[in-house]
Image (cartoon, coloured by chain):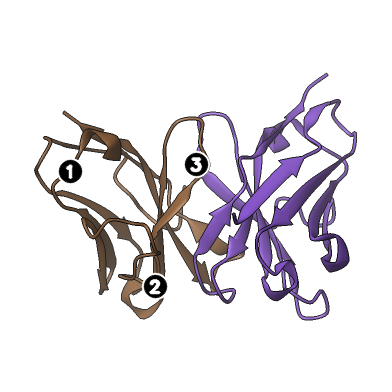
Chain colours: A brown, B purple
């Protein structure tokens, strides 16, 4: 089981908005980072510190974090956004310290 | 170009050892804390170990590898290492090296392409 809870899959039609959640008690009190991973490739950081984007990441990718849920939002979804998405936190209450969620497979219909 | 390139993976028998390397280029390696993250076949990402930019600050391990794996770095050679011993079947994975964006509470903004470790008799 994972300390961070993500839905196994999310499906969305092109042009629509995808929302991927990451759940943990009081996750709103710590910073959350999000990664995109396409098959056979290394992960790519798409959002850090809840809502900041690294350079080169489209504005369509945004994040929020409050209470027990952090959310990665992908607006105007494109076929190329189909990938696995992982949330990650630095959790001093966990033996793992750096914790990843179980991942969510985003399918573009 | 900022780049991390892993090497050293391969097939090893249970109980064996392997040393992974990660060569950094395109940035000031000595200024960044680094990580090893692994991914078992068909599974998610799992943090393995982290080391501060100066080895005297911190070194941490996941419980699953503590006592068996040793992380180290050579800032003069722009290289990160992971010495793995007493390997088990469950250590089979792609191993990525990754750079912290700024500090240990940050995300990891640069990743290598990964090197595959297979533990099997």
Give the residue at x 32% y 57%. Answer: A22
Which is nearer the N-term, disc 2 or disc 1? 2
Q: Secondary structure at mark 2?
A: loop
Quarter that holds the N terminus of chain B: bottom right
Say which mark, if any, is on residue A77: 1
- In the displayed structure, A103 sits above or below B121; it is below
> Do badges 2 and 1 share one subunit?
yes
Answer left or right for A65 relative to A86. Answer: left
- Identify the chain of the residue marked 3, using the numbered disc in the image: B
Which circle marks residue A49 in the picture? 2
Q: Residue at x 28, y 40 (%)?
A: A81
Indicate left or right for A72 with A24 as reference.
left
Which of the two residues, B120 or B34, is positioned nearer the viewer here?
A: B34
Q: Label 1, label 3: how many angstroms apart (C-alpha)?
A: 23 Å
Q: CA distance from mark 2 to mark 3?
A: 21 Å
Residue A96 visible? The answer is no
Q: Chain of mark 2?
A: A
Q: Which percent across, then down, holds residue B119?
A: 77, 28
Give me the residue at 70% from left, 69% from top. Answer: B28
Q: Quadrant of the C terminus of chain B?
A: top right
Question: Circle 3 sits on which residue?
Answer: B44
Q: Secondary structure at mark 1?
A: loop
């Amino acid at each position: 089981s994972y300390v961070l809870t993500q839905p196994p899959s999310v499906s969305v039609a092109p042009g629509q908005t995808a929302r991927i959640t990451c759940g943990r008690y009081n996750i709103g009190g710590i910073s959350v980072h999000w990664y995109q991973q396409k098959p056979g490739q290394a992960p790519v950081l798409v959002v850090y510190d809840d809502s900041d984007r690294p350079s080169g990441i489209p504005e369509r990718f945004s994040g929020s974090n409050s209470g027990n849920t952090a959310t990665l939002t992908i607006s105007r979804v494109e076929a190329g956004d189909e990938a696995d998405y992982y949330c990650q936190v630095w959790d001093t209450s966990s033996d793992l310290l750096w914790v990843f969620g179980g991942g969510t497979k985003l399918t573009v219909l | 170009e900022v780049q991390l390139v892993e090497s050293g993976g391969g097939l090893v028998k249970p109980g064996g050892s392997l040393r992974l390397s990660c060569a950094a280029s395109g940035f000031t390696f000595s200024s960044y804390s680094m990580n090893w993250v692994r991914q078992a076949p068909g599974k998610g990402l799992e943090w393995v170990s982290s080391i501060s930019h100066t080895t005297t600050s911190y070194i941490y391990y996941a419980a699953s590898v503590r006592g068996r794996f040793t992380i180290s770095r050579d800032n003069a050679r722009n290289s990160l290492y992971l010495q793995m011993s007493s390997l088990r079947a469950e250590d089979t994975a792609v191993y990525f090296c990754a750079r912290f964006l700024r500090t240990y509470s940050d995300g990891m903004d640069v990743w290598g392409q990964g090197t595959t470790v297979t533990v099997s008799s």
